[in-house]
Amino acid sequence: MAQILKKVVGHESQIQMLLQALEQQRFPSTLLFVGQSGIGKKLVAQGFIQYLVCEKDRGCGSCPACLRVENGQSESFLHITPESGVIRVDKAREIISFISLQNPGKARIILIEDAQLMNEQTANALLKSLEEPPERTYFILLVPSIASVLPTIRSRAQVVRFGALPLAQLEKISQIKEEWILKSAQGSVELAEQLQNEDLSLLRQRSLDIWVDLLEGAPERAIETVKELVKDRQGALQVCRIWQQLLRDSGYYRHGVHEVIHKDFVHLIQRLADYSDSVLGTLGVEAYGLEQDIRGNLDRSLAFENYLYQSQNVFQTDTEARHE
């Protein structure tokens, strides 16, 4: 039994802005909460749902209406989530039916998670409801980025941007102490908890060791290791992200920024930082391209093998140029 907003860590300015809108009776009917997953967007949304339905005002956390929201049993609240990676038109029909109820109570709220996964048919079915919702009806849509949202949806909503949680706040919420996990999570509690997995820690170790083999002129050994790591798509994507972070760390280190993600691999970072900005930039761009190839379902083993051989050639070309 509690006010949900009091559970939120961070996002003080966003919360204050929305509270002020409530006080002034100008709370938007359609809100677009923008920010990566795991940073608290949904918790903030649930907190304001309490505010909107509270029988005593101000989301007391103790009245029956507030308790029903906290327990996910409120008749005034419809929670929409994707199924099999998409929000289909039947969900739009469910929403339209919900907002057509004659007695909305104090308020009626629709929370749509991953709203960017609405297909065009679903979005079109909801446009009129989003633009002119019935009285005391509110929509809150959660998305990772503005670019991921259809323009027709974006133009009908008030955008509220949520930034990544600072390291201190992330550590407080997650109770995680490993610095590389906190930095790799980029402010997301959800991602930080995933990174605690022992298998992922081992994958990180082996992914970074591959670059040691590459720098020591052993690409065949590096390729044999990576083939073991990328047998599944999720593992392949994790390897891509770790390599992208390593190359970014090396670029930062080269320019005197030593607060890097993979600080426990500083000797590897220092070796890579000896190469030029051009080399690190090329490898970084190619690493992002590698991720897109994997997302596009290209042959994983072949894609990683090509990337490692290309990287080896880049190193050799740069070394030869410096010794001419």
Image (tube, grey):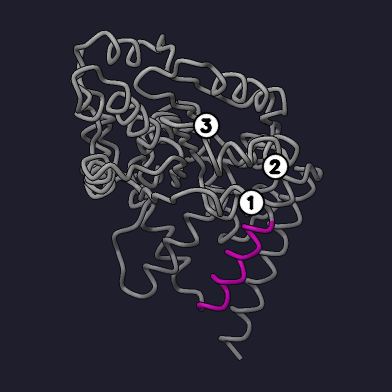
Residue type pointed to by label 2? Glu
Residue at image position (66%, 78%) is: 317
Above/below status of 168 relative to 5 = below
Question: Could you tell me which residue is drawn at 31 percent across and 31 percent down?
Answer: 48
User: Magenta part of the protein: which range?
Assistant: 277-289
Name the residue carrying label 1. 152
> In front of the other: label 2 or label 3?
3
User: Which of the two discs, 2 and 3, labels the residue nearer the N terminus?
Assistant: 3
The CA span between labels 2 and 3 is 40 Å
Q: Quadrant of the N terminus?
A: top left
| Label 1 residue SS | helix
Quarter where residue 319 is shown: bottom right
Residue 114 placed where, x, y %?
Answer: 55, 35
Which of the two labelled residues, at mark 2 and mark 1, occupies the earlier sequence position?
Answer: 1
**Callout 2 secondary element:** helix
Q: Main secondary structure of the magenta part?
A: helix
Few, some or many residues within 10 Å of mark 1 (<14, 14–19, 20+): few
Q: Nearer the viewer, mark 1 or mark 3?
A: 1
Magenta segment: does it hold 113? no
Residue 224 bears which disc, if any? 2
Residue 243, above or below 227: below
Q: Residue 236 sits in which quadrant?
A: top right
Give the side of residue 220 with respect to residue 142, left or right.
Answer: right
**Residue 137 point in image, percent of width and height:** 45, 30
Mark 2 Cα-neighbour bin, 10 Å: few <14, some 14–19, many ≥20: few
Q: Earlier in the sequence, mark 1 or mark 3?
A: 3
The answer to which of 252 and 50 lies nearer the viewer is: 50
Query: What residue sits 59% from the left and 24% below the top?
Result: 95
